[in-house]
């Protein structure tokens, strides 16, 4: 039974407790050895995520703001800082899997120590000042981001193991056909893009610095697909020689494809016994690829090549945001079925409901006929990750959060089955290099009118 | 005495002849050995540029359109295709410097053969059809681009030679002080960006596919620097520890800086005897760095870090285009002093004239007080290279010209001392990866209002 | 209290049990996480060593020879084969640290299952045939080799952890001065080199194929150092600029030194507070380098450069063997103090006893005045690893044991504090590439008469 | 008409002139561009060889010994030193192909200047002292080595050019069948190996330091093949799956084969029209592989794998030397047909004469029935390149000639079609890394008796 997501309106102390608990809930079923492994440089061991999210609270809240707080272990800041240059020296990222010590038990002890100290701090009104309240919102969102990484990183760790262990067993049931792709038109116009500063609570006001400032953008007329592209559709691209057709690919993508021998999406493997001719690793183990489920774990290059093959293109992030606002109900929470997002514990994207709603009732968030905007798979946009006009990073080490990555990355929108529900907004900008594929990255088509 | 640039209004045959002649003029003073060397993968030997620009005419004009034309040498298309996948197999780019044969003499013979065939074809009205006329405009612009590369590639070839040969001797005269940087304000507004299809002649209508289609963009209020950043200003950044201050740098730039040991711009070397403490290789040999000349050969990462240090930022390409249109006089040719652009044969950027014009008269192109917009140094924008709304590449192999590079590159604007004057428009989009520095790449600051 | 080493004369079943037990004894004090980590490609996780040595018995003894034996787990041979091409496909060596499953507990269950099956097989006379007896001797020696690797690999794993954990605590006591290096002369002559086939028992007869056949070699007159080179002596080489003096180094070694920035031995770190100016990581944690202990963890290149600096050279393997036979007492076991070899559980080499024996009595193995020939540190010879005249590898997968490594490796002799005592013979040939340093590799000088 | 090789008994001045002339004779037919190219790091441009051999005389003879000699150009020592650390800083080896200047003409002017200065020096008795005479012998041998490299480097440069130019045209005539391989037995015994110091003249006394000192070695009984392995025999190895049979290969060789995709010797290409199914690049252009010619351009790994497949092995260098002395007639010059060695200008190995001599008369050097010992193809031995007992490099920069390469290289014997005839002795030790193939490297089989 999936946990109810934390409501935005609850107290900061309750929200803090809910986030910390959710992080640990994701560890259910793991054995000690699972916490240690780093299967590639992009992946961090579960143990490291547990400790790093703890280090964040200790470094940015307890140490500067909680009277009398003493570091739990003086050696930990070096080990568990990630990339905050201004927060001190760091252990090399690629070597996080070389650390057998501190043990998993010791890391949990560190976690619990800091959780307790934070709760005491919050219960004593520590978050009453705006400055501290802002840092706490960053911390909650930061830990939510690492929840997503814990899921995707474990998926990678398990996938490279020839034993192919499962994180959660799941029954194998074929998905229903979501029907043919439809197109939703939007007229040309001037739009406000990005997040404004208003909001009644710190949680409502919160957004990452890269989502602002709110500014005007003119968006030419466009149409956008009413659901994600499916595995079945993507398999047609493969069957049509998409991976061997250089004119479909960006030059850099073609070079990567040649260097790495790409012939199908990450995690897919040829399997003559599977209906589509492919199986793939999922967090429920190896499964035949289901034609009706959304294709995911695509690089930008693959998503872009597919779109070109399909006579379409990827949306810009402004187009995506315009479309997303049209289905956002203003409740402060993403419209999506209960099994979407990480709290659904499916850890695998669902097929879209049929346009009429499948079970007869329209799904949440399917207003305007747009399905799967949130909580199934991140959607590559063709927008490279750049600052908005007037963008300014926040001061200090927390300012290293976003701005310094604005080169050679593309924006993704919408959240995935590994994202916490309360973490997503229509303005939310995720970003990854175009060759990254270990996140749940899918695609939605667009075209100019 | 520099050649007068070809006027846009002359006949296509005359323009063709002028472009071909200009390419060869750049070879003056070279010895046979200079044509052969490839000093890094980005660089091509002069011999290859001479042959590749010839192959283009043969492949895209003579072979398909000139009756009875037979390939000059059946082995050349493989050797001299660059990256047009649809135009056949290619010799490996990184091995262009391994070819001693065909000899320089044989390449010139090939050139002259094709030049003659083209002139006969043009004189016989071969370019009268719109389709052919369009390809010829691409060919002229393509050869102009390789003129620029010939200059920058030779600069690199000579620079790695410990003997440090000069392409052209030039007297060493200190530049005049261009005065402090001024700011020019632009109001927020909706603008038409990119090139429209109109124009009386094929030459006027011509633009690369990536410059279109013309579309609307809302540009928030901004200010832009009235001249390029100088070497003297950049040396202050160095002296202030700019290369050691991680918070000034993009994350990827910092990693490159650490991996490659950057501590000053490409071609600069510490030199205690030089006024600024640096000398640099120029096409006139090693020279002390002049504080008043524009800094160039910057990577995007350096330009971006400098701007952050200076409390400013780089312009977006829309901002740059808005500013550039304000000084463009509509004559069809870039406003700039006679010594700008490649025909000036300075091969090194000049200091800006003083705001009053220096010699008492305002320089061409300094309307609105904006100096050095064209023909001195390419200006990095913070816009990553992306398609305009409604962008469609042209069909066939020529469609590989631009669109397939739209990932991990940044847009540069304005042209440099290596660019042919007739090649530049306010809409012209050049692009390079953020770590590239062997072009004449400088920077102009901007800031949000 | 260190375990007594297994006597050669005991039954094969007892020797098997002793070897299996000794492997597990080395795991004392480890936590679950320690078994998982692979800190570089040369290193294997402890868990893998435990499973691989088990796979060996299952593959080469139980499956072919034990009636009715069924594989414990059909997936394990793929995971735990190392490099025996003829024994089937293998998991990639560099990815052994990516496997969280099977768990440590599961690996121990596998171990115990196979140990029990083997003991039943041996008790039932399974080793009575010569063919099987030979394989069992190989298996015992193979597992002993992995005992050594378990120690050296754990040392590396712990060393890259900033917490620098210890495998065994050990009191810090300064070593006694072993006195100045003496030289022992040997006359020119024809010698029998390598192992003959004779011996009363399989254990006595056993040797690796690379140790034979016995053959004649003429050895010119030479002298050999009477003890290993000490850390103090090596520190003089450093202080004298040995690491910056190209003429002392082999060309390839100098290139490695430049590429990797070598300035002291592996595991050494500058430490102003330490007497010699260096501390080093040991399996008892970080310790000041003791001037009287033998220097170890040297690459061949460093050992060779030191010898040149000292006006000497490394011995050939024939010279070393001639010297070693002069102190070998024929008892079938290496002459060395009780604290030498892995059973001593020092995991760190001792200083040489003083020439007179230190405590008044000559140490075992110090006949002819040669100290530290066995069980302290492997001694680099200048002999590259080549086949003896008439060498033939054994047939089948076990023939891949030695012969296929005969390129770009150097021979080492004598065993170390990580080697099981019963594993060493005067004819024993170990081999490593010249840049390897994570074994306990030291040096003994030689010179031509 | 090939030049007669210089007789050993001629004066040093005449020998000097002959060697200098021979170097330049190899440039016949080259165009300017051919002198510039460096097609891989191992290869040097012809221009560099011409200058480096000139630098040697200037540095080691004229500057220290010729009164009043002034450097021709102060910048040249930096450019044309190869690896003599003690002779000053060096230009990076991998960048020799980046130098268009000095021009070919300037390099020849440098050469002639130094040749003239040397002749005046020698004619004035400059070589009368033993010390200078010794250096001159080194210089002559050094320049001969570079003659060999000029040929093999040009072969590589031309081979990577898709135009496949020829250095010398040669008629295509099928070689005669040399008959089946025979075996020549040698008994076990103690031998003197290496070069002694005696000799009437400096030329006779000369040898490289690595050939001495003369010492005793016991060689067990062996047999050696009476000719080189042919292309036809090697093609059987390929057809039998030799390149896919891991057990035939050294572990390191197998890894190289997988990484580089080896499936046939260097320079060979599949060609359905050729009799053996392969053509190969030769200095006469692309030719079908002739089954009777010796196979060459083998790596050590291929030679070793072939030998194992053939049920034999490679000889040790001592075995080869014992066999070679049995056919050496003491005349001071290698016994071989007039078309062998570089002066033959075949630049490609000949098939062996038939055992009876083919044309009815025994060929020179075929005493004891051993054919092709000298001047056709270097013969890989299984001996890794190590110092002889008592070896001492000469003092000073010339001591860097040999000793510093004694790691990870294998010894080759006998000389090739690119080696000057007067350069070879039975004791001559050439050495290359086991993966090198751009020399004329072949193989002769051996086996233990």
Image (cartoon, coloured by chain):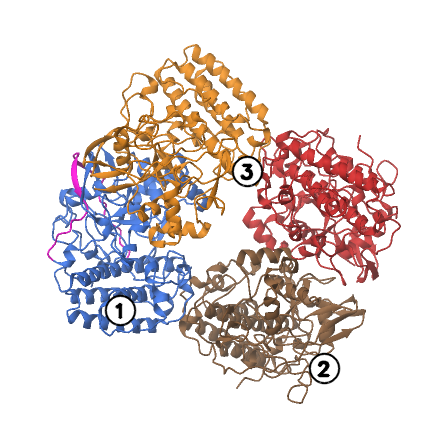
Chain colours: A orange, B blue, C red, D brown
Q: Label 2 to label 3, Cα distance in Å?
A: 67 Å
Q: Quadrant of the C terminus of chain C?
A: bottom right
Magenta span: helix, strand or loop, mainly?
Answer: loop
Q: Is residue A420 visible?
A: yes
- Residue occupied by mark 3: A164
**Residue B81's x, y, as percent?**
34, 63
Secondary structure under tag 2 reads helix
Mark 2 vs mark 1, foreground winner is 1
Residue D96 badge: none
Q: Where C382 sits versus D354, above or below?
A: above
Residue A1 in magenta? no
Q: Label 2: how many residues lie within 10 Å, few (<14), some (14-19) or many (20+)?
A: some
Give, as a single range, the part of the protein colored magenta. Answer: B171-200
Q: Horizontal and vertical percent for residue A315?
A: 29, 39
Residue at image mark 1 = B63
Q: Is residue A123 above or below residue A230?
A: above
What chain letter is assigned to the residue under label 3?
A
Q: Secondary structure at mark 3?
A: loop
**Would you say residue B339 is visible in this rendering?**
no
Above or below, C329 against C169 in this view is below
Q: Is residue B193 inside the magenta stretch?
A: yes
CA distance separating discs 1 and 3: 57 Å
Q: Which residue is mark 2?
A: D367
| Residue placed most toward the observer, C111 or B414 | C111
Q: Residue at x 13, y 48 (%)?
A: B362
Q: Quadrant of residue B187?
A: top left
Single out the residue that lies furthest toward the front: A360
Alpha carbons under labels 2 and 1: distance apart: 64 Å
**In which image quadrant can residue C175 be found?**
top right
Both marks 1 and 3 on one chain: no
């Amino acid at each position: 039974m999936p946990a109810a997501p934390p409501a935005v309106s609850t107290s900061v102390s309750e929200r803090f407790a809910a986030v910390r608990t959710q992080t640990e809930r994701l560890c259910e079923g793991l054995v000690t050895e699972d916490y240690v492994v780093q299967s590639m440089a992009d992946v961090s061991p579960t143990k490291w995520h547990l400790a790093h999210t703890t280090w964040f609270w200790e470094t940015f809240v307890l140490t500067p703001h909680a009277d009398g707080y003493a570091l739990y272990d003086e050696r930990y800041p070096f080990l568990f800082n990630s990339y905050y240059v201004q927060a001190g020296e760091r252990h090399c990222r690629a070597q996080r899997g070389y650390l057998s010590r501190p043990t998993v038990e010791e890391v949990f002890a560190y976690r619990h120590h800091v959780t307790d100290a934070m709760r005491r701090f919050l219960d004593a009104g520590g978050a009453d000042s705006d400055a501290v309240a802002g840092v706490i919102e960053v911390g909650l969102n930061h830990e939510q981001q690492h929840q997503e990484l814990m899921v995707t990183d474990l998926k990678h760790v398990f996938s490279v193991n020839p034993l192919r262990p499962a994180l959660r067993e799941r029954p194998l049931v074929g998905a229903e056909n979501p029907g043919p792709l439809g197109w939703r038109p939007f007229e040309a116009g001037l739009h406000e893009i990005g997040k404004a500063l208003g909001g009644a609570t710190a949680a409502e006001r919160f957004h990452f610095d890269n989502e602002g400032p709110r500014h005007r953008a003119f968006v030419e007329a466009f149409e956008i697909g009413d659901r994600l592209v499916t595995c079945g559709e993507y398999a047609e691209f493969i069957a049509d020689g998409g991976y061997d057709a250089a004119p479909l690919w960006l030059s850099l993508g073609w070079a990567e494809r040649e260097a790495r021998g790409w012939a199908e999406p990450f995690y897919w493997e040829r399997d003559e016994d599977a209906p589509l001719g492919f199986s793939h690793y999922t967090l429920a183990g190896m499964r035949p690829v289901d034609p009706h489920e959304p294709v995911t774990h695509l690089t930008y290059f693959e998503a872009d090549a597919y779109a070109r093959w399909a006579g379409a293109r990827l949306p810009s992030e402004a187009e995506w945001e315009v479309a997303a606002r049209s289905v956002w109900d203003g409740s402060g929470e993403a419209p999506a079925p209960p099994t979407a997002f990480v709290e659904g514990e499916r850890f695998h994207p669902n097929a879209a409901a049929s346009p009429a709603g499948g079970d007869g009732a329209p799904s949440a968030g399917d207003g305007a006929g747009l399905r799967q905007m949130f909580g199934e798979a991140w959607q590559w946009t063709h927008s490279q990750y750049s600052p908005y006009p007037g963008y300014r990073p926040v001061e200090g080490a927390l300012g290293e959060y976003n701005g310094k990555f604005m080169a050679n990355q593309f924006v993704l929108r919408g959240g995935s089955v590994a994202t916490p529900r309360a973490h997503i907004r229509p303005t939310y900008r995720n970003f990854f290099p175009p060759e990254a594929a270990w996140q749940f990255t899918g695609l939605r088509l667009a075209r100019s009118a």
